[in-house]
Amino acid sequence: MNHSSKKILSPFFIFGLALLILNDFLLKAAFHNAFTGKLSDFCGLFVFPVFWSALFPRFKSWIFILSGVLFAFWKSEYASGLIELMTTVFPIERTVDYTDWLALPMLLLGWFHLDGKVQPATNNVLLTRFGTAFTAIVSIFSFCATSQQRYVQSFDHPQYVLLRSAVMPDAKLYGEFELYRMDSLLIVKVNQQYISRPVLDDDYNKNRSLENLDVYAIGRIGDNTSRMPQGEITALSIETPLGKDSLRFKGGRLDGRFTRTKNGRLIIEGFYKLGIEDSIWTFKDSSSNAVITQHIVKGERTKVEQFRDAKLISSIRINTRSDSIRNIKFKIGMMVLCIAGIIVLLRRNYRNTYPEQLVLKRYWKWLLCLISPIFIWLFFLGMNILLINYSPDIFETLAAIIFIYMATCPLLFIAVFVIKMRKEVDIVLYCLLFSIACCIWTISGVLIELTH
């Protein structure tokens, strides 16, 4: 193993890599603000060139130069054509934001970091080889996961934004949009939105996606589009495949009464407040015999009623955000009680058998510590599916495995070599203990989102 490749085991590089993954998969989803958006740029511009320069030290200068040039190009409007071409193959999220260039000085920090005397986190030859291979795999995963759009938010109600545009964009490049142009106005019907956090089946998280829908549309379409002046009222009607939609905009967002008619019959009627559904929404079939009404308060459905021939058939109450918060707090409380019970069992096993301990050969102890995190992740996955309808994609799954492995492996070494197990069941109890703790961490993130 060459000396340069060991530099990815330095504490600074590992910290930057861990912070990059933590921000992309946890902090962005929990806080979704400007700081978390910039944090990925700062960490990425340090980790990316350092990693490739450590593997290919002869090309260090070119790696750093190209990293800076390509980053600046990617964050500019000049990359829109390339991104539109790439989007036809797989979805990519990119927002034109020149303030992201503030992260470019991180290239200098990475250059000086490689030039300095870097001390690896460990001097053990076996651990160094294993750690280098593991860190390299995690690094490549983080680069792929950062640029990959992971989640798609769809909308039950019609969603439009109004923009100014000098040209008509090619609608084939934007699978999530339907585009309509009137003079200098571009009406964008948003059928779905690519987001960076897990899609949860509740109105609150859907509303979060709607907050900056016009900014999202401009970022996706790119050149020759701009936002409407705030407060400007625009009323217009457009013909769509589903019917004739009558729209009222305030600035670039829907505001006021919305109707959809087909063959002269009213099939949808509702109201918006700055892009968020409000009041009572009515949905009718083509004969107007079957009617569904949704009672909505600030974008959150509180009750859904179904009528047929003017008679009430069903009435369903929908959980609001406050209901979801209460339910999550109850689940967290139950898991805390489970953790307390497991700790009591471990303590009882310790006291009943002390000073005796479970006799295992050293290599079995190492094997337990290195393999048990996989079982912890399986327990964690099962509990999340049961408790929060957890449906991660491949990137989030790999991130969860990496985080759980990095967090629980050292704890298992402490349990096995320092505290020492007393009974065979102790290893199962430790796996359950750590998996429940990880599950509390995940569900607490959802709670932070709801209460933010």
Image (cartoon, grey):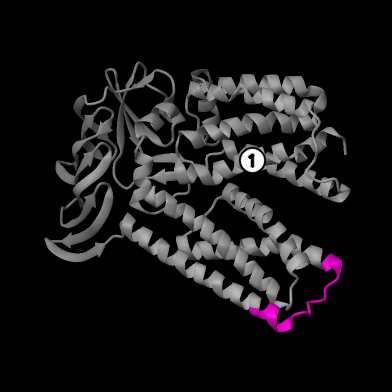
One can see residue 88 in this view: no
Query: What is the x, y in percent for residue 161?
Result: 31, 31
Quarter assignment of residue 52: top right
Q: Return the residue found at the far left.
A: 310
Is 359 a magenta residue?
A: yes
Q: Give, as a single range, the part of the protein colored magenta.
A: 348-364
User: Can you say whether 71 is above or below 263 in the image?
Assistant: above
Q: Is residue 61 left or right of residue 191?
A: right
Query: What is the x, y in percent for residue 118?
Result: 79, 34
In this rendered view, identify the residue nearer to me: 151 or 417. 417
Residue topped by disc 1: 142
Q: Return the residue found at the far bottom.
A: 352
Quarter assignment of residue 349: bottom right
Is 137 a magenta residue?
A: no
In this rendered view, identify the residue nearer to me: 243 or 221. 221
Task: Say which quadrant the N terminus sits in.
Answer: top right
User: Can you say whether 30 is above or below 362 in the image?
Assistant: above
Q: Is residue 177 left or right of residue 106?
A: left
Under mark 1, the amino acid is: Ser
User: Can you say whether 353 is above or below 158 in the image?
Assistant: below
Q: Is residue 267 left or right of residue 364?
A: left
Query: What is the x, y in percent for residue 359?
Result: 82, 76
In this rendered view, identify the residue nearer to me: 48 or 115. 115
- 10 Å crowding of disc 1: few (<14), some (14-19), many (20+): many
User: Can you say whether 438 is above or below 172 in the image?
Assistant: below
The residue depicted at 71 percent of the width and 57 percent of the height is: 410
